[in-house]
Amino acid sequence: MRFGIGILVALVVFSVDQATKYAVLNIWHLQSGVILTPLPVLDLVLVWNHGITFGLFAGFGAKILLAVLASAVVFALLVWMFRTRSWLVTIAVGAIAGGAVGNVLDRLRYGAVVDFIHVHIGALAYPWVFNVGDSAIVCGVAALMIDNLRRKPPVAADKG
C-alpha cells in the first residue's frame, strides 16, 4: 500500500511537471528572453538548462550520461521507497523520483531541461530559474532531512 502511494505521488509530480512544461512551450509559446508576470512575486521565463542542478556541468555536453545517471538514481529511489516503513519517506522519495523522471525525459527529448519559474519579492530575487520537478525534488530532500533530524539516536547497548 505504502509503495503504491509513493508511485502515485511520483506520477502526480511527473504529470504536473510535464503539463506545465507543455503549457510553457506549446500553449503560451514562451520564448527565451520573454518574461510573463502572472503574479507580483512570480515571473515565467524560459531557460534551457543543459547542466544539472543550477546548471552545473552544462558545458560537458553529457546529456546521455546525465540521463543514465539520473535513471540509476531513480531506480535506487524506487528500491528505497519499496523498503521504507515511513510514510514521510515514501512520499518524499516519490516526489523526488517524479521530479527526476520529468527532468530525465526533458533531457532525452530536448537535450536540456525546461526551466521557467522565477520567484522574487521586488528587487530581491531567487537567483535560479526552476520547474515543478525541481521544486518536488527540493521539497522531497527537505522532508528527508527533517525526517532524519527528528529521529531519536539509537541507544547504546549496556556493556555491563
Image: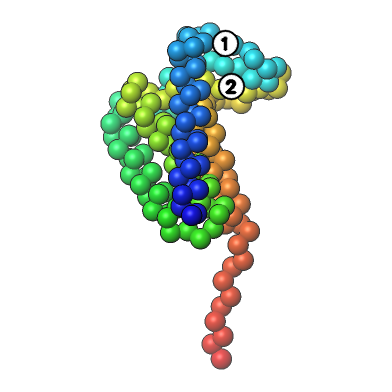
| Any part of residue 59 in sight | no
The crowd level at tag 2 (other Cα within 10 Å; few <14, some 14-19, many 20+) is: many
Residue 145, horizontal then vertical, whole percent: 57, 51
The crowd level at tag 1 (other Cα within 10 Å; few <14, some 14-19, many 20+) is: some
- 137 or 5: nearer the eye? 5
> Helix, strand or loop at disc 1?
strand
Location of residue 120 by image quarter? top right
> Helix, strand or loop at disc 2?
strand
Location of residue 36 by image quarter? top right
Residue underneath mark 1: 35
Residue 58, horizontal then vertical, whole percent: 38, 26
Instruction: Compute the Cα span from label 1 to label 2.
Output: 10 Å
Q: Residue at x 43, y 59 (%)?
A: 83
Q: Classify 125 as above or below 97.
A: above
Which quadrant, please, contains the C terminus?
Answer: bottom right
Q: Residue at x 55, y 54 (%)?
A: 87
Q: Classify 148 as above or below 91.
A: below
Residue 52, horizontal then vertical, whole percent: 41, 32
Q: Are marks 1 and 2 in contact (CB under 8 Å)?
A: yes
| Any part of residue 135 in sight | yes
Q: Residue at x 42, y 55 (%)?
A: 82
- Residue 31 is left or right of residue 69, and the answer is right
Q: Residue at x 45, y 45 (%)?
A: 7
Q: Amino acid at mark 1?
A: Ile
Q: Residue furthest toward the front?
A: 1
Residue underneath mark 2: 118
Q: Amino acid at mark 2?
A: His
